Image (spheres, grey):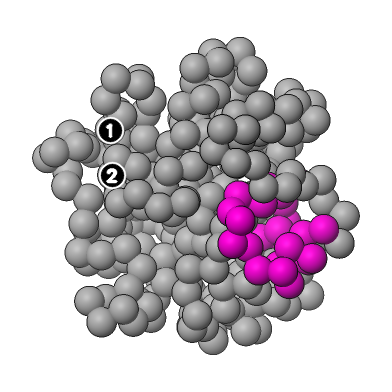
Amino acid sequence: MKDKRILYVSSEVVPYLAENEVSLMSYDVPKMINDQGGQIRIFMPRYGNINERRHQLHEVIRLSGMNLVVNDLDMPLIIKVASIPKERIQVYFIDNDEYFKRKATFADEEGVLYPDNDERAIFFAKGVVETVKKLNWVPDIIHVHGWLASMLPIYMKHYYKNEALFSETKIVTSVYGQSFDENLDLEMINKVKFDGVPHESVADLETPNYENILKASILHSDAVIIASENVSPSLTKFIESSGKPFLPFATKDAFAEAYTNFYRTMGL
């Protein structure tokens, strides 16, 4: 994988957030490729519960300052960056006071999902792409982890479909076990359609629950990885019948070879 460029876009990454399936794999996979000589970048949201001082985050002024439109509202984009200690891996943080300042990730202290999680996902997707454009860094693969990052494949295939920078880029989505039971805002599909995405392409978002959000993401990806033993049978069946190349679940001690070989099947 030497010199191959892979962009990792994740809703959670250790050491910045607590350990779980998503955050651990969002660290382990990039580290593996980095160790193989690949060129990587990681993007994640800058949630308010990330300790900026401890992790030495700092704002990148040249990348910040633009406004992104979400549901017809201008939202300022702030970019921060940090390095994972000892690994020489740069992590870029997508920030906005309205969406990410609160002191938790996806839900309040009562466990209730934030009502604007759908808009946070849209803002995150646009923020990642706009920042990569400013960096003028062309990824061979974009690898998506976590449901909050799941709008990225959709926006890449529609909103950014004419961006020459990404004309050869392939999108891989890792699918994890269900992490919430409720619906996101029922207006989510209209907010996505506001950006020119056809209704039939995101019809699953009419009921924006965890599984349907992942289905919409899978349909807009070039390949899929089943990253958890706990993916529901219905979502697993959807992946298997999607016609997309997919990698079955690989255990912790086997994932490195499996993921590397899977990347290579995509032309790397």
Mark carried by residue 82: 1
State the image coordinates of residue 75 (x, y, percent, origin top left): 35, 63
Q: Residues within 10 Å of mark 2 (few under 14, many from 20)?
A: some
- Tell me what residue is drawn at x 73 percent, y 47 percent: 248
Q: Earlier in the sequence, mark 1 or mark 2?
A: 2
Q: Secondary structure at mark 1?
A: strand
Graded by Cα atoms within 10 Å as few (under 14), some (14 to 19) or many (20 or more), the crowding at tag 1 reads some
What residue is shown at x 57% (from left), y 78% (from top)? Answer: 209
Residue closest to the eye, 76 or 3: 3
**Which residue occupies the foreground of this view, 199 or 64?**
199
**Residue 57 quadrant:** top left
Relative height, residue 260 to residue 228 (above, below): above
Q: In the picture, residue 81 is in which quadrant?
A: top left
Q: Are marks 1 and 2 in contact (CB under 8 Å)?
A: yes
Q: Position of residue 52 (x, y in %)?
A: 17, 43
Viewer-side label of 1, 2: 2
Q: Which residue is mark 2?
A: 16
| Residue range (magenta) | 216-240
